[in-house]
Amino acid sequence: MFKSKRLIAFVMTVLMTSMLFAGCASKEQKEVSEEKDKVEVNVFQFKVEIAKELEEAVLAYEKEHPNVKINVQTVGGGDDYGAALKAKFQSGSEPDIFNVGGPQDVQDWMNKLEDLSDQPWVDLALPGILSGVTVDEKVFALPFNIEGYGFVYNKGIFEAAGIDPLKIVDYKSLEEAVKTLDAKIKNGELKEKYPLLEAVFEYPAKETWVTGLHTSNAILGQEFNSSIEAFHADKVAFKYGDALKKLIDLQANYSSNKDEKQKLNAVDYTRQAEEGLAIERVAMIQQGNWVYGKIKGVDENVAKNLDILPMPVKGGKEDCIPVGVPMHWVVNKDSKDEVKAAAKDFLNWLYTSDEGKDYIVNKFYFIPPLKGFENFEPKDALGKAVKRYAEAGKTTPWVFMGYPTGWGMEVLGNDIQKYLAGEYTWEEVISDAKAKWEKMR
């Protein structure tokens, strides 16, 4: 009897051990299988201002979609995204989602673009917003957002200087305000309240996307009606070339490097925004609503007290700001089918789900490019400012996505650096930029 009990116990032990190992093996096999079935999507994007928040959005998406792993790499700000993207493809490490600007980029990257015409967000697009990325009635890209830029200023500093921003409606009134502010900074009148304040502007000429694209767009956005028109233009006339000079000179002459303007060529985005406007070292900068998050990251109270002044083109439309789409999402048509499906689903989730919309408006501080965001109005100070200009019709278009490839940053941006360094006259800047446009077109 005793032996029988020992035998039964032995058999039971063997059975339970076998079941345990079988269970572990099954679990391991399942995990290996799930890992093997997981789809991996590589994103290569340019917007440094949302890098952290985009990673958070990806985690939220992955939580709902455990079979998808999304890797995000961000290159932008002071780095050349276009050059980095080309290097990425040349190395054979092609991303599944990447960014293109407008019609020129669409043409340059056409052999890599997936047709997105059947995506749910296409029918939600605001009127005309897909025109720059539509070819032969096929839609190839999802707009990031709508952005606007002008002179982002600290309302508190203007109030302390006794300047009424509502009266700044043209170049003349802007110049007068700048001179008044400069005089009060120099005589120390604002020192007690703003001890770090040293200049009206900070102009980051190192960032040729600021000078060669955005500053120039203020005047070329009044020479061309759209990026499509710029894209088809064989020549550029610089109809408002003198106004462009005035906008550059104003920012350079009232910057902290006004006596050594060549030093502006070393001033970068961080020095202008986080180490300039955010700490109240300067009163205003040429930037857009995308800078809100960067300023908030340094001082939320300063961010809340920002607004945007017009970027007046003397002789043209003056009481306005340029408003447009900065970049688009595209899907690599050569990625695997399951990867493309996951990439499209992620973009749809980001722009059409309630959780995604919350990221778009309240965490990225984007102004949506699609309908369906009625319950997600911009809450940040600069998003509200851009909306105010748009609703008042005080806008001009973004046309720099129609410039010849590399012309804005590598030609005009570099020529502006030579002008600030005293190596080029203004006439040489215009002459060289005109000739290179024709050659590169």
Image (cartoon, rainbow, N blue to C red):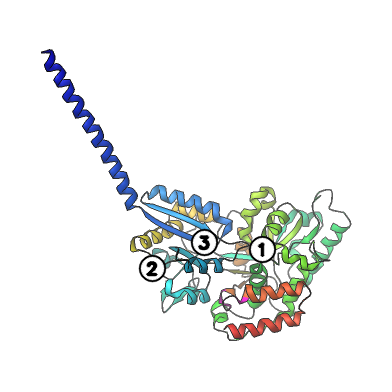
**Residue stretch in magenta:** 401-407
Q: Earlier in the sequence, mark 3 or mark 2?
A: 3
- Residue 293, visible in the rendered structure: yes
Left-right relation of 429 to 404: right
> Picture quarter containing residue 200?
bottom right
Question: Residue at horizontal 74%, vertical 62%?
Answer: 202
Q: Identify residue for label 3.
A: 45
Structural crowding at the residue carrying mark 1, measured as other residues with C-alpha within 10 Å and reported as few (<14), some (14–19) or many (≥20): many
Structural crowding at the residue carrying mark 2, measured as other residues with C-alpha within 10 Å and reported as few (<14), some (14–19) or many (≥20): some
- Residue 139, visible in the rendered structure: no
Q: Position of residue 28 (x, y in %)?
A: 30, 41
Q: CA distance from mark 2 to mark 1?
A: 36 Å
Q: Earlier in the sequence, mark 3 or mark 1?
A: 3
Q: Identify residue for label 2.
A: 334
SS of the residue under disc 3: strand
Structural crowding at the residue carrying mark 3, measured as other residues with C-alpha within 10 Å and reported as few (<14), some (14–19) or many (≥20): many
Left-right relation of 418 to 70: right
Amino acid type assigned to the residue bearing label 3 in the image? Gln
Question: Residue at horizontal 35%, vertical 52%?
Answer: 38
Name the foreground residue: 86 vs 238. 86
Q: Earlier in the sequence, mark 2 or mark 1?
A: 1
| Residue 287, label in figure | 1
Name the foreground residue: 153 vs 340. 340
Amino acid type assigned to the residue bearing label 2 in the image? Asp
The total number of labels drawn is 3
Q: In which quadrant is the C terminus drawn?
A: bottom right
SS of the residue under disc 1: strand
Q: Nearer the viewer, mark 3 or mark 1?
A: 3
Name the foreground residue: 392 vs 422. 422
